[in-house]
Image (spheres, grey):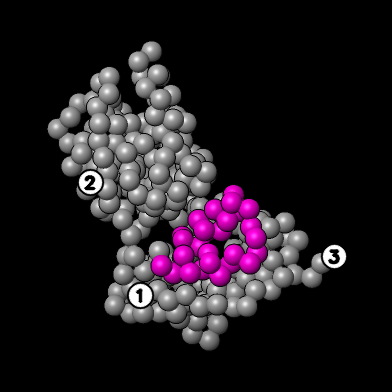
Amino acid sequence: MELTSSKEHGLHIVTVQEHRIDAAVALAFKDRMRDATDGGDETVLLDLNHVQFIDSSGLGAIVAAMKNLGPERKLVLAGLTPTVDKVFRLTRMDSVFGVFPTVEAALADFQS
Amino acid sequence: MPDPVVLPPFSVSLAGAEDAVRAGLAQAMTCLRPLGLSVDDAGTVELVLAEVLNNVVEHALRSTEELTNVEVRGAQSAKGLRLTVIDRGVPMPKGIAPAAKAPDVDVPIEDLPEGGFGWFMIHSLATEVHYARIGGTNHLTLLLPVGT
């Protein structure tokens, strides 16, 4: 489970370098997210543009990652591909997370 | 009215490990390719099958070392794609498939659920869900509104 991080304009961008967040890697995703985000205080933007598929375990892991940030920080999402977007809409989790079509759109919103 | 297109039944192997479903699911999607589903429809099928196969591995298999062959039967008609997934695991509790329970997202973030979405997703994406225990095997039949 490979995640890469960058910091831009006060936003911590975490890019998932995997095509799937499913039952096989949900735990690893949670662990890697914790490693990447613990101890910080910025809003985290999760860039999912490489991810073609998530199942309910993957969704749960993303929710866990947001809860792990604590009440003072936000987790926003960018680059939801069609099947991933379907999962968020079906479960209404798209209303819980800020969702942006691209990282650029998220950055623009964050800076305004 | 065209006759249903019945796919030759196929088996996928699920070894009882976490990545078992990934391989089995990929096999299943390959076997369904002759249906020529749109990308969106294929996504629906993959989502439902992932949840069903996850469920087989998590609940039906007696031990995590077991290798089990799950048979998948598919028939495409104007009504949609009827998929039957057959496994030899333990029966579903109460003899019926779990109901759809929508995750409650109107709660504070710290109370958001992290699981229990699987059957909700299956019921949301399938127009029919039917479970039967037949001679020591579980038969889960789904009708998916795809390929129509």
List x then y, in percent, for residue B29: 53, 64
Q: Residue at x 20, y 26 (%)?
A: A41
Taking the magenta stretch, the answer to whether it contains residue B123 is no
The reply, left or right, for residue A74 in relation to residue B119 is left
- Tag 2: amino acid: Arg
- Dot placed on the residue nearer the N-terminal end, 3 or 1: 3
The Cα–Cα distance between marks 2 and 3, rounded to whole angstroms, is: 53 Å
Q: Tag 3, which chain?
A: B
- Could you tell me the amino acid type at mark 3? Met
* Residue A102 pos. (x, y %): 44, 30
Magenta highlight: main SS: helix
Q: Is residue A108 above or below residue B60?
A: above
Disc 2 target residue: A32
| Discs 2, 3 touching: Cβ within 8 Å | no
**What is the distance, in whole Å, between disc 3 and disc 1 at their CAs?**
41 Å
Residue, far left: A39
Q: Which secondary structure lies at badge 1?
A: strand
Residue B35 position in % (x across, y down): 65, 64
Which residue is found at the position 45% from the left and 55% from the top? B118
Give the class, few, some or many, for how many residues have Cα within 10 Å of label 3's Cα (few <14, many ≥20).
Answer: few
Say what secondary structure mark 3 lies in.
loop
Kind of residue indicated by mark 1:
Ala
Q: Do marks 2 and 3 both belong to one polypeptide chain?
A: no
Q: What chain does mark 2 sit on?
A: A
Task: Determine which of the numbered discs, if any, sits on residue A104 in the image.
Answer: none
Quarter that holds the C terminus of chain A: top left
Q: Residue furthest right?
A: B1
Tell me the magenta residue range: B23-51
Mark number displayed over residue B1: 3
